[in-house]
Amino acid sequence: MGCGASMYPLAGREKKSVPEVVVYVPSMRIPAHSDLQRPLRGLIPQDLVDRLACLRNQIVLVAEDTGGSAVTELRRALEEYLSLLIGLTKKEHGLEGLVEFKWKNLETGRQENSVANSWFELLSVIHMIAMLTLSEANTLMIPKDRSGSGIRVVSSDCKRDAVDLLLKASGCLVFCVREILAHLPPDIKKTFSKDFQDGVLEAISIQALGQGTEIQLGFAVESQKASLSVKRRLACEQLIYFSQAYHFLSGLDMSNGHGKKHLCFIKWKFLEAKAAAYYYHGLILDKGTEPACHVSAVCCFLAAGGLLSESKKACLTFCLTAPVTRSPPLWGAMKHLHQKIPEVASRKSQMYGYLLEEEKALQALPDLPDFQLSLAPDDYVLPEIDPAWDRDKWGIHSQPLKEHLKDSEDETGT
């Protein structure tokens, strides 16, 4: 990948439209200009310094010129950059805190972080890979009219690919939490933007699993072979995922631009999942022969109806919360349930109205069953460290770090 001027047209960024959101992607952060040359000069081979700076600059150019839409090229550049960046984190090289890495918000261009720590850079790069992966999943899930008929659909292959991407994004974020944050001291963590607060990365990771389960529930609803038990299980699992995601965010300051919208999205999906879970639980209870079974079933259907109404309001709140977005046409399970829940709730209430009057003591909303969660994040594995970090092949006399720092101070003072 060359280091010359970008070949991407800038005009594409001038087009203003309200984006559709199926998979929620928090704000994208990209590298900002950082000086890698001066801090690393004389400590590692110059061609290695040049490659690090070149790749980082190329990531900035592609991200800015395409608004982050060139996912394949960005991911390839980020993976190549990672293989070089890993060398800066190795203790034996003593370079961990030399470079001040700067990152900015892609949408606003505002600098959000400036941290002299290569582990922070590693965290930021893998976080960007996760956000690009979520963005790609969202693109796959936006319905398209490929036939010109005016009917927008998402193919089954796109849905399956989206689930795979959601699991990969979740795995990237789990890696960030478990393998990188532990290397960063508390004083540095305090300087992080709100996107990197403790709990936010975990919430996004779990949310991705919840959305993968949401797509699976849609497959089950469309399949004649899927039983009510399978549909209930998937709806309950989706509910658990979004409940966990909300738990991670509930105690945090989410007043920043995307934080409030993120919470609105979690609430919307939580309400949808809960409505689906009670609906399918009600259908299973209604198969019982005892009056109490029918009363409990009606309670479930009525609860599902109320939750569905709340979810519609939550969807509107999410869309109107800045930055403004649109929700696509109803899809998956909710396309079916938006019609079925009100219909079944009304019919069953009329059918068993006399039982509701006779068995008022039984009019309690039953607990939903608890299930072991099925989806798990894909394991993220760092690329191999670039062979350029083999010190035996450097053939240079490395300047002692203390002398290097003194020289850098002298340069700054002149």
Image: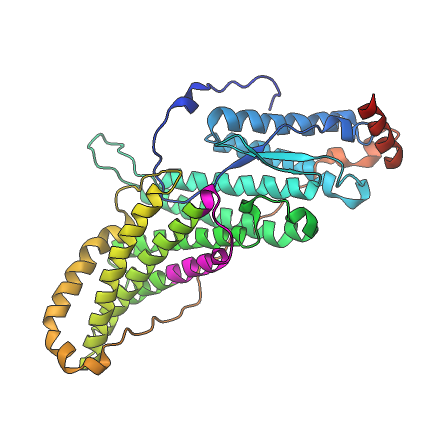
The location of residue 143, given as percent across then percent down, is: 30, 38
The location of residue 231, given as percent across then percent down, is: 30, 62
**Number of marks in the rendered image:** 0
The location of residue 395, given as percent across then percent down, is: 85, 28
Q: Residue at x 63, y 34 (%)?
A: 102
Is any part of residue 378 visible from this angle? no
Magenta region, residue range: 237-259
Q: Is residue 20 magenta?
A: no
The location of residue 362, given as percent across then percent down, is: 23, 80
Position of 372 relative to 9 (above/below): below
Side of 313 where 65 appears, left or right: right
Quadrant showing the N terminus = top right
Q: Is residue 240 magenta?
A: yes
Q: Quadrant of residue 289?
A: bottom left
Q: Quadrant of residue 18?
A: top left
Side of 152 where 118 appears, left or right: right
Q: Residue at x 23, y 71 (%)?
A: 299
Name the one closer to the observer, 252 or 76: 252
Position of 304 relative to 60 (above/below): below
Side of 244 where 52 appears, left or right: right
Q: Residue at x 21, y 37 (%)?
A: 151
